[in-house]
Image: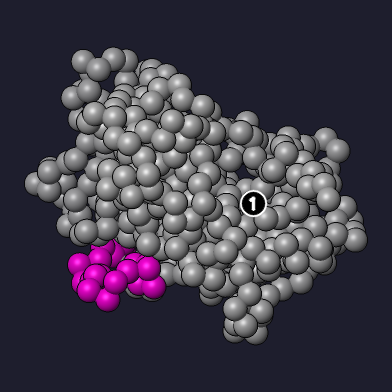
């Protein structure tokens, strides 16, 4: 029997699956829909529809609670005159009988032309995409990413603040576990914005993400001492290096000037997030969680600041701001419809003047090779919430890593994108570990172990000190 050809299609799992230019194309189409279909009384609200999705079906597979994401996708598909099938309660789907996500996706690919997936496990969307013959849209996977929320956030910034490059954006709250923040930070630095991180105590951005911002996205991250700022919150400044912002950041000698300048700068937007209580251990506490209210916003730096929140809010964003003209969060939720209409239309190829490139398997092959090894044969992802550790998927899932070679090589989980903290690389042909990081080794010949003992137990010889 021949293996079926992997179809050419397009998934959206991480915001980094889209180029800056493609994000611009989604926004152009979203703006086109908004101009054409908006409610005459409310500019930000879509009030009528198109015929282009006739005969197409969107499946929403939600294994976690959702209001905005699921309903705005369903509303968007309906506005395109497509149909929607939903599995929003995992207790009534076959997951309750023990069906794997891999099988659910393979089956649903035959019932729908596009699937939106929300799942509590980090990396579940990338895994699902590996099994899908129709586009998968990540509607939020654990604390990993939520790329379509970021599209709505950026679109809102464009409407409220115009050009995203050179904006100063404060992000407040649970930065460790907020998937919306993770996708947003990548996008903002790509577009050249400066970010002031205001995490709740102990809820800073995860270390793997900070490392990646520095090494791959060429960001500087400066910690600002508490007495330098007039809030209760510790702040960190994330600033893009050249070439994004040459005017503000001419060379490294100007760093101190740049930082001082940024501290004085007005904040263009505040992005507030809730404590992600379902993703924390019981021991974690939100006792000192920052609250954004009228008093916080009265500082002169916030006089023209748009206030964004992906919602739901649970106390961290005071209702005393709802009537304030800086509050943009309900408009931000409304923009979910034109943005998601545009995304669906592009992924399904419904608009002849607006297209996204398609790839075999659904992604552009990245700069870094992906190394795959059977589960239990070597190193594994260290993130216990990664889909790779889900018992129900054990028979379908391999340990897959992106291999980023160099002086300080990185082994990154293909699914949840966290880095494996320590590992030993070896050559499968010669059954030997490498003494030094393998530079140009062919990925097919590579295998990774957790440590030397595991390599020896698998019958590998140690080459000097690895
Ligand atoms: C967010 C999510 O699910 O990550 N909600 C949303 O999709 N708008 C934010 C959150 O739950 O805090």
The image quarter containing residue 341 is: bottom right
Classify residue 135 as left or right of residue 422. Answer: right
Q: Callout 1: 10 Å neighbours few (<14), some, many (20+)? A: some
Horizontally, is 84 left or right of 185 in the view? right
Q: Count the marks.
A: 1
In this orientation, which residue lies closer to the viewer: 329 or 83?
83
Against 21, is 44 above or below? below
**Place of residue 212 in the rendered image (x, y in percent of width and height, measured from the top left):** 37, 37
Q: Quadrant of the C terminus?
A: top left
Residue at 48% across, 32% down: 429
- How far across and down, in percent of the image, does residue 277 sit? 35, 72
Closer to the camera in the image, 187 or 254: 187
Residue 282 lies in the magenta stretch = yes
Q: Residue at x 90, y 59 (%)?
A: 54
Q: Secondary structure at mark 1?
A: helix
Residue hosting label 1 = 130
Residue extending furthest left?
Answer: 227
Queried whether the magenta region covers residue 258, the answer comes back as no
Relative image position of residue 352 (x, y in whole percent) = 86, 38
Q: Which residues are magenta?
A: 275-293
| 104 vs 365: above or below | below
- Say which of 156 and 26 sits in front: 26
Is any atom of residue 427 visible in this view?
A: yes
Q: Residue at x 27, y 76 (%)?
A: 282
Label 1 lies in ligand 1 vicinity (Cβ under 8 Å): no
Horizontally, residue 118 falls left or right of residue 79, namely left
Q: Residue 460 at x, y = what percent?
A: 36, 40
Identity of the residue drawn at 19% across and 50% down: 234
Residue 207 seen in render: no
Above or below for 320 versus 157: below
């Amino acid at each position: 029997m021949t293996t079926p050809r992997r179809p050419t299609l397009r998934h959206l799992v991480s915001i980094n699956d889209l180029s800056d230019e493609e994000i611009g194309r989604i926004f152009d189409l979203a703006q086109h829909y908004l101009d054409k279909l908006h409610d005459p009384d409310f500019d930000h609200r879509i009030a009528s529809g198109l015929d282009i999705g006739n005969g197409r079906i969107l499946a929403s597979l939600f294994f976690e609670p959702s209001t905005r994401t699921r309903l705005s996708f369903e509303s968007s598909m309906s506005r395109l005159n497509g149909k929607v099938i939903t599995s929003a309660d995992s207790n009534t789907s076959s997951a309750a009988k023990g069906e794997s996500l891999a099988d659910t996706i393979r089956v649903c690919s035959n019932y729908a032309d596009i699937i939106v997936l929300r799942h509590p496990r980090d990396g579940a969307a990338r895994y699902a995409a590996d099994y899908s013959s129709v586009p998968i849209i990540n509607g939020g996977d654990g604390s990993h990413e939520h790329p379509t929320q970021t599209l709505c956030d950026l679109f809102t910034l464009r409407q409220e603040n115009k050009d995203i490059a050179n904006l100063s954006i404060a992000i407040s709250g649970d930065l460790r576990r907020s998937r919306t923040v993770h996708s947003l930070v990548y996008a903002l630095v790509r577009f050249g914005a400066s970010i002031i991180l205001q995490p709740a105590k102990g809820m800073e951005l995860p270390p793997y993400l900070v490392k990646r911002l520095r090494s791959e996205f060429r960001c500087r991250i400066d910690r600002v001492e508490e007495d330098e700022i007039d809030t209760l919150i510790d702040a960190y400044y994330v600033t893009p290096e050249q070439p994004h912002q040459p005017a503000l950041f001419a060379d490294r000698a100007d760093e101190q000037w740049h930082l001082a300048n940024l501290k004085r700068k007005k904040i263009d937007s505040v992005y507030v997030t809730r404590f992600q209580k379902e993703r924390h251990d019981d021991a974690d506490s939100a006792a000192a969680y920052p609250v954004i209210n009228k008093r916080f916003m009265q500082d002169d730096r916030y006089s023209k600041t748009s206030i964004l929140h992906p919602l739901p809010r649970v106390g961290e964003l005071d209702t005393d701001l709802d009537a304030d003209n800086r509050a943009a969060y309900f408009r931000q939720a409304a923009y979910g419809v034109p943005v998601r209409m545009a995304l669906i239309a592009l992924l399904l190829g419904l608009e002849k003047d607006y297209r996204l490139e398609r790839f075999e398997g659904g992604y552009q092959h990245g700069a870094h090779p992906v190394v795959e090894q059977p589960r239990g044969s070597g190193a594994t992802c260290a993130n216990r919430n990664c889909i790779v550790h889900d018992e129900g998927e054990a028979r379908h899932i391999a340990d897959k890593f992106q291999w980023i070679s160099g002086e300080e090589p990185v082994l990154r989980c293909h699914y949840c994108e966290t880095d494996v903290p320590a590992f030993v690389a070896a050559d499968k042909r010669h059954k030997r570990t490498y003494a030094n990081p393998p530079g140009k080794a062919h990925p097919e010949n590579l295998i990774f172990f957790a440590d030397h003992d595991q390599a020896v137990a698998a019958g590998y010889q140690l080459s000097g000190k690895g």
